[in-house]
Image (cartoon, helix red, strand yellow):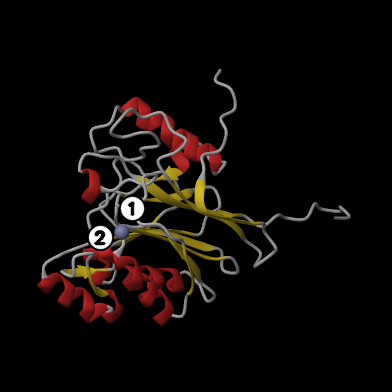
């Protein structure tokens, strides 16, 4: 038997016990390159299963993240991300292959939801009163097409009234040069996402657009700093091409039921 692994380091980690902000608690955070077993160029905590890394290394890395969130590995839920706006509800491990979607929502405390990124913006949401959570993969197309709003709507359909969100590290606007027509499309959804690159060319700040959309939807937001392309501890597809994926991961912590006849 392998020994007990240390938890993987998480950026923006927050752990709120049940009963503090609502009946439900939650744990959220963002993985980096650190704490895994993958060899270069995927070193070390690559969680992406479709980037050419050794499947055994990816499985070991995913197990380490699952252990950090105290769920069995099959209950760390990944999507088949496709830069769309589809939101899928999760009640347990997928039966068969993961569905093509870019957001997952749940009302359960026995799953952890993951959104994979390498430059794109990972977003995690919870309502600890209603007991709902979501993980979102928001790249430029998803932000432009409204995946954030779709996810907030799905959570409110499940009873959410007091949502809070955390937006993880992503490629920054200075490092994300794109053609002017992409800037214009993004700006139609969120004007603040239109920016310029380090060399003054048209660029999109996807995370700023995501934050703007969350705030306008009435969601309280924390924004974790760090540019994927500039920070060597993060994976960047733009910067590195062949590389790994990190993840934003969120888990609800179920209300602690009082012991029948107990005194606590
Ligand atoms: Zn940058």
Q: Earlier in the sequence, mark 2 or mark 1?
A: 2
Q: Residue 113, percent across and down?
A: 44, 51
In the rendered structure, find residue 175 and report the number of the disc placed on it.
2
Front residue (pair 52, 126): 52
For the residues labelled 2 and 1, the Cα–Cα distance comes to 9 Å
- Badge 1: few (under 14), some or many (20 or more) residues near its Cα, within 10 Å? many
Q: Can residue 121 be seen?
A: yes
For the point 28% across and 56% down, which residue is it? Answer: 101
> What is the secondary structure assignment of the residue under circle 2?
helix
Q: Are marks 2 and 1 in contact (CB under 8 Å)?
A: yes
Quadrant hosting residue 23: bottom right
For the point 28% across and 72% down, which residue is it? Answer: 146
- Of the 4 image quadrants, the one containing the N terminus is top right
Q: Can residue 85 be seen?
A: no
Q: Residue furthest top?
A: 1
> What is the secondary structure assignment of the residue under circle 1?
loop
- Badge 2: few (under 14), some or many (20 or more) residues near its Cα, within 10 Å? many
Quadrant hosting residue 32: top left
Front residue (pair 200, 63): 200
């Amino acid at each position: 038997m392998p020994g007990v692994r240390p938890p993987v380091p998480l950026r923006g980690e927050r752990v709120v016990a049940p009963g503090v902000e609502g009946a439900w608690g939650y744990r959220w955070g963002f993985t980096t390159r650190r704490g895994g077993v993958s060899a270069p160029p995927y070193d070390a905590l690559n969680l992406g299963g479709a980037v050419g890394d050794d499947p055994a290394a990816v499985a070991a890395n995913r197990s380490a993240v699952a252990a950090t969130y105290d769920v069995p590995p099959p209950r760390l839920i990944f999507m088949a991300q496709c830069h769309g706006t589809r939101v899928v509800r999760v009640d347990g491990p997928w039966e068969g292959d993961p569905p093509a979607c870019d957001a997952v929502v749940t009302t359960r405390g026995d799953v952890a939801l993951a959104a994979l990124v390498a430059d794109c913006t990972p977003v995690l949401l919870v309502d600890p009163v209603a007991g709902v959570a979501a993980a979102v993969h928001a790249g430029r197309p998803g932000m432009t097409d409204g995946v954030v709003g779709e996810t907030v709507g799905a959570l409110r359909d499940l009873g959410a009234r007091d949502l809070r969100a955390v937006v993880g590290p992503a490629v920054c606007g200075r490092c994300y040069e794109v053609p002017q027509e992409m800037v214009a499309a993004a700006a139609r959804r969120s004007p603040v996402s239109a920016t310029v690159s380090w060399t003054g060319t048209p660029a999109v700040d996807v995370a700023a657009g995501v934050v703007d959309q969350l705030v306008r939807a009435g969601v309280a937001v924390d924004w974790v700093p760090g540019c994927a392309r500039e920070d060597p501890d993060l994976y960047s597809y733009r910067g590195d091409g062949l590389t790994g994926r990190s993840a934003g991961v969120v888990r609800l912590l179920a209300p602690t039921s009082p012991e029948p006849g107990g005194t606590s």
